[in-house]
Amino acid sequence: MCGPDGTPDSGVLLVGDKRLNWMDTSDLMSVGRLIRDDKELRRTAAGFIGYGDTKSGDRVLLAVDNHYDSRVYDTLAAVLREKGAKVDVVVVDAGPDYEVGESEEVDIVMRREPWDNKPRRWEGIPWIERLAAERNYDLLVHGKGGGIPQTSHRYEAAPWLSVEQFGSQATTFPREVHVAINEKLWDSFRLRGVGGRVHLTDPEGTDLTYTLHQDYFDGTRRGYGDVPWWGHVMGHGPTPILPQEDASGIVAGTMNHVSRAFPRIEVELQKGRVEHVRGGGGYGDAWRALKKESDGTKYPSFPDNGLFWLWEVAIGTNPKIERPSNLHMASSGGFEWERRRAGVIHCGFGTRWRGPEEKWAGAEGILYGHLHVHLLFPTLRITALDGSTMSIIEHGHLTVLDDPEIRELAAKYGDPDVVLREDWFPDMPGINAPGLYEEYAKNPGKFIYAAAK
């Protein structure tokens, strides 16, 4: 991995003005102390996680699986013990590491039984959550993605599978700058955009429009209120979906959270519901089968039959996220990590993670879950009710990074051009790299995994 001038900088990060190496144990401890002392914002996004309320005598349960690099959780345990906390570490056996396939996301996310029976990878494991509550732990550190439930004890995430992720500038990105980015971005939707029209495009073929209906902002939907969904700013209202939902068009791409990159998929929506799924290789085949199975079901979160309704248009906000190495293996986390990068959008179709509709479906033995398509070079614009147009993302660049107030704040930490620079964009033939997109779209893995090695 290289900087913009071509100088290798793999494994190097900055904490304050000190240059660190994430292969050095003492340097990992420096990163861990930053996380330990930051106040939490109850999210699973790098840059918003903190265990700063931990004090001497607190009891902490740190629960991960064996696909985590032990140096990550050993560091977290060590820095919490420095504060005088008593830390118990549980490592759950997730089985041996393996090479993922095109339908991996379906296997991990979709269920027909209560999630307690078969927890989806990286969401909270019910017996771990029960243990934390029954044994009166003060803090549970557990889980990698998705929402964190409200509990009587503090509950924070550990999304870093590897030291490559843990010891990165994404993890140490200045908290106050990241907060300000999220707040300004969210204000574009909740203050200026309400009632307006969104137009979302991407060079891989996405062309989608929808209305930011006022009723989505009624305060009943978590993540769509006064406070942004940190690091995962929602460009569309979460479930329950409104009867007047009008999202129509195409969402297209070649990757989701955890599957192997697949041939280009095209998802066609009409009034919020997925009507057709075309292409997509093994992922597309699996999705079409699930759609056929669920087309006749009326879910309580949707205005009409069918499982696959758009609710998630989630915008990453951290400019320092970079694609992890070893992408073809499950232990890398695949493309899930990069969804956090500023300007990347992931679209989600189906029930909301641990939402009431999933509890209902699980109890009834009915299919539930939601599937994703990632957009790496999106352009998102909002036409407000007064006719003005706001450019939120341009070709994968989050425009709030150019805001004068954000730049002034970033200047406290160095050159704002450097602090706010997106350090990684993928090379995609025909879009920002030599070659034909049509050839890439047939077999994206041929390009992506060769480049990652």
Image (cartoon, rainbow, N blue to C red):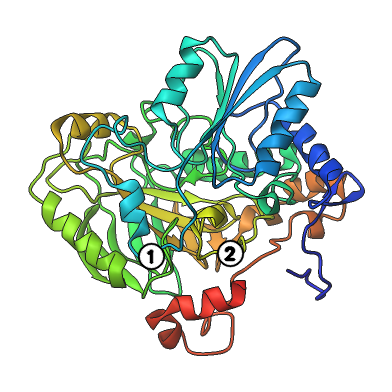
Residue 199 position in % (x across, y down): 40, 61
Q: Nearer the viewer, residue 336 or 245?
A: 336
Q: Is residue 153 above or below residue 8?
A: above
In this figure, which residue is indicated by the disc labeled 2?
A: 326
Say which amino acid is labelled 2.
Asn
Say which amino acid is labelled 1.
Gly
> Does the rendering let one see residue 385?
no
Q: Is residue 285 above or below residue 159?
A: below
Quadrant of the frame with the C terminus: bottom right
Residue 35 position in % (x across, y down): 72, 34
Q: Which residue is located at x 46 percent, y 30 percent?
A: 225
Of labels 1 and 2, earlier in sequence is 1
Query: Residues under labels 1 and 2: Cα distance?
Result: 14 Å
In this figure, which residue is indicated by the disc labeled 1?
A: 101
From the viewer's perspective, tell me whether residue 309 is left or right of residue 84: left
Residue 124 position in % (x across, y down): 44, 32
Residues packed near mark 1 inside 10 Å, few (<14), some (14 to 19) or many (20 plus): some
| Outermost bottom residue | 435
Q: Which residue is located at x 45 percent, y 34 percent?
A: 147
Give the structural element (helix, strand or loop) at label 1: loop
Q: Nearer the viewer, residue 42 or 215?
A: 42
> Does the rendering let one see residue 122?
yes
Whether residues under marks 1 and 2 lie with C-beta atoms below 8 angstroms apart, the answer is no
